[in-house]
Amino acid sequence: MSGTLLEQLVDALRCLPGVGPKSAQRIAFHVLDRNRAGAKHLAETMLQAIERIGHCEDCRTYTEDRRCPICASDKRDNSVLCIVERPQDVTAIEQAAEYRGKYFVLLGRLSPLDGVRPEDIGMDLLRQRLASGVIAEVILAVSTTMEGEATAHYVAELARASNVRVSRIAYGVPLGGELEYIDRGTLRHALTSRRDL
């Protein structure tokens, strides 16, 4: 790597999402001018995290151990499996919902145009898990993008092949939302996904 150490620092900061050249420069000057101790702590913590955090052998979310606390818990329902795209989706559901089942993190979504195939996102592992006979229901909590829909369809087919019930989280009108401000696609999905009261 060439350039001064300051230039290298600015360039390294650009690996963060949403950080362009100007933001990276501002961050670099801030930590050098005002918060060297905070920057040192951040660097040490990041290094430890990179070295010690891996993927859970069961659900594939991030953990420091072989199995994450959710998979290791005997208080969770082993028969219900929520399928999500990313580890941060697990965190979002855990913080917002009363879900008591287990998870499977795909670490992506199918995208043939980008060369992302079923084996690239762990479908072989999911197939094994579904074939175990332990799972009674799969809850699809994947995005509603074209790739997300293709992924949901693929997972649903896998689940049905193992006689596992498939459901999908509801999408639509947000709590407290007014219909006149909801986009057409969301409103259409909310109407077609309606349920009895």
Image (tube, helix red, strand yellow):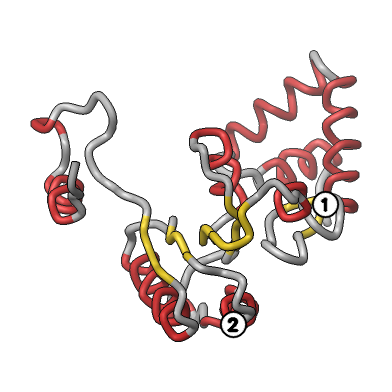
Q: Residue at x 37, y 52 (%)?
A: 169
Q: Nearer the viewer, residue 41 or 185?
A: 185
Q: Position of residue 35 (x, y in %)?
A: 82, 17
- Neighbor class of circle 1 (other Cα within 10 Å; few <14, some 14-19, many 20+) is some
Q: Quadrant of residue 42?
A: top right
| 125 on left or right of 113 | right
Amino acid type at mark 1: Ile
The residue lying at 58 percent from left, 52 percent from top is 101
The answer to whether residue 45 is visible is yes
Hey, which quadrant is residue 160 in on the image?
Answer: bottom left
Residue located beneath label 2 in the image: 131
Query: Going by the image, does 65 lie left or right of 115?
Result: right
Describe the element under mark 2 as helix, strand or loop. Answer: helix
Residue 79 percent location from the top left of the image: 57, 63
Question: Mark 1: which secondary structure?
Answer: loop
| Residue position marked by numbered label 1 in the rendering | 53
- What amino acid type is highlighted by mark number 2? Ala
Counting labels gives 2
